[in-house]
Image (spheres, helix red, strand yellow):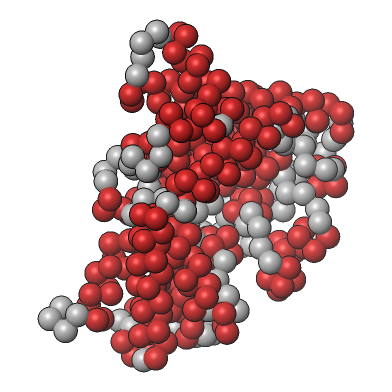
């Protein structure tokens, strides 16, 4: 299908490096729509519903999960892509897939699993997201994984260590040569940042671990948007004030990103996707807004992510992951047959795949099954 309104440096089926296993062109949808449809229909995508963002899944029904987080990233990413004449379908595909490789229990789970895997090549959630879409999804007749377009895979692999980059071949080359990914990947990456900073403010206040008053006192971005909200609706308070503040912050960030990126693009004048790879990052915030974002991130780190109650949950999560790994690596025959290493996969990697694929509640259940004598 024609993608005539796109900028000349946007990713299209025509300038794409395509799929590993060639397929017939889709009818009535674009190649990148096909990718995002495959992602939505994957098993790993459904699991995101029961995986932690900051709060463990059972802590409350209203907190973001990895699924609602990914949907918010996609919404923000699409708005930016449309304004910049980039490929919206690709941004949506990357956004929906970017967290597929996350372990249960958020960053605490990832750190614990990385520690367990130290002797076996380590564990990085971005590499795991790529592994999910390239290898672990197993419901297509013709190939393992989802056989996605190269640029979707490039966007999913946001970062990786240099060692892993070298082992990855063409997809890892950009990290070695220090080239930029597509503008669509850059958009998805910053949409992720806009989404989590804002929803963590919202969830943090909802959980009573942080307060709007404290945020107003210590961060410029919250302070001025809360003031705007109070001016628009005098006497507004509680959840309405929080929401009116957060929606204004998202709007400011998205608008700033579009305006700043447009001016960077106008200056660099890329004529093709190839030019984008060699240009400096063209998607970004203005210096003033980037500074405000940093201040907010710092506040969240100090007051939310390192809150003693979050730290306690993280410590428990780390112990569960470590216990599971130690039990299974000590005796791989404890694994149900369908999770045993497939030909060519190291036992430790198969165990990491199994653990990374677990939802929060499945990890807790499996822990009880392996450690509680009256559970089976
Ligand atoms: Mg994310």
Q: Residue at x 66, y 63 (%)?
A: 160
Q: Residue at x 36, y 10 (%)?
A: 235
Q: From the image, which quarter does the N terminus lie in? A: top right
Q: Can residue 103 be seen at all in this image of the molecule?
A: no
User: From the viewer's perspective, is residue 41 above or below residue 170?
Assistant: above
Query: Residue 233 occupies which quadrant of the picture?
Result: top left
Q: Position of residue 258 (x, y in %)?
A: 68, 26
User: From the viewer's perspective, is residue 169 above or below residue 239?
Assistant: below
Residue in the foreground of this view, choosing between 20 and 136: 136
Left or right: 250, with 17 as reference point: left
Kindly give the residue lying farthest to the left in the view shown: 374
Left or right: 348, with 360 as reference point: right
Q: Position of residue 203 (x, y in %)?
A: 38, 39
Q: Residue at x 80, y 30 (%)?
A: 265
Q: Position of residue 37 (x, y in %)?
A: 47, 46
Q: Residue at x 36, y 61 (%)?
A: 312
Q: Can residue 296 be seen at all in this image of the molecule?
A: yes
């Amino acid at each position: 299908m024609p993608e005539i309104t796109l900028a000349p440096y946007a990713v299209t089926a025509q300038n794409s490096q395509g799929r590993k296993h060639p397929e017939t062109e889709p009818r009535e949808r674009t190649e990148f729509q096909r990718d995002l449809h495959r992602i939505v229909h994957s098993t790993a995508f459904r699991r995101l519903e029961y995986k932690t963002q900051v709060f463990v899944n059972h802590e409350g029904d209203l907190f973001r999960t990895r699924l609602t987080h990914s949907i918010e990233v996609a919404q923000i990413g699409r708005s930016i892509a449309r304004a910049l004449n980039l490929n919206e379908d690709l941004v949506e595909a990357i956004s929906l897939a970017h967290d597929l490789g996350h372990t249960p229990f958020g960053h605490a789970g990832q750190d614990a699993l990385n520690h367990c895997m130290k002797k076996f090549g380590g564990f990085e959630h971005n590499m795991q997201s790529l592994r999910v879409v390239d290898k672990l999804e197993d419901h297509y007749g013709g190939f393992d994984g989802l056989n996605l377009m190269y640029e979707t895979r490039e966007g999913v692999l946001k970062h990786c260590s240099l060692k892993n980059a070298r082992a990855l071949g063409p997809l890892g080359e950009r990290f070695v040569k220090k080239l930029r990914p597509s503008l669509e990947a850059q958009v998805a990456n910053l949409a992720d940042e806009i989404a989590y900073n804002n929803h963590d403010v919202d969830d943090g206040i909802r959980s009573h671990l942080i307060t709007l008053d404290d945020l107003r006192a210590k961060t410029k971005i919250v302070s001025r948007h809360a003031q705007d909200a109070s001016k628009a609706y005098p006497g507004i308070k509680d959840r309405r004030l929080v929401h009116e503040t957060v929606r204004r912050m998202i709007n400011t960030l998205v608008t700033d990103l579009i305006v700043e990126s447009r001016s960077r693009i106008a200056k660099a004048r890329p004529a093709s996707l190839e030019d984008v790879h060699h240009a400096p990052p063209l998607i970004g915030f203005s210096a003033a807004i980037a500074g405000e974002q940093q201040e907010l991130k710092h506040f969240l780190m100090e007051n939310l992510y390192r809150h003693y109650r979050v730290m306690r949950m993280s410590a428990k999560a780390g112990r569960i992951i470590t216990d599971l790994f130690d039990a299974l690596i000590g005796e791989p025959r404890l694994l149900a047959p369908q999770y045993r290493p497939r030909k060519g996969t190291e036992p430790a990697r198969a165990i990491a795949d199994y653990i990374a694929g677990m939802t929060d509640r499945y990890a807790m259940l499996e822990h009880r099954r392996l450690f509680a004598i009256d559970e089976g």
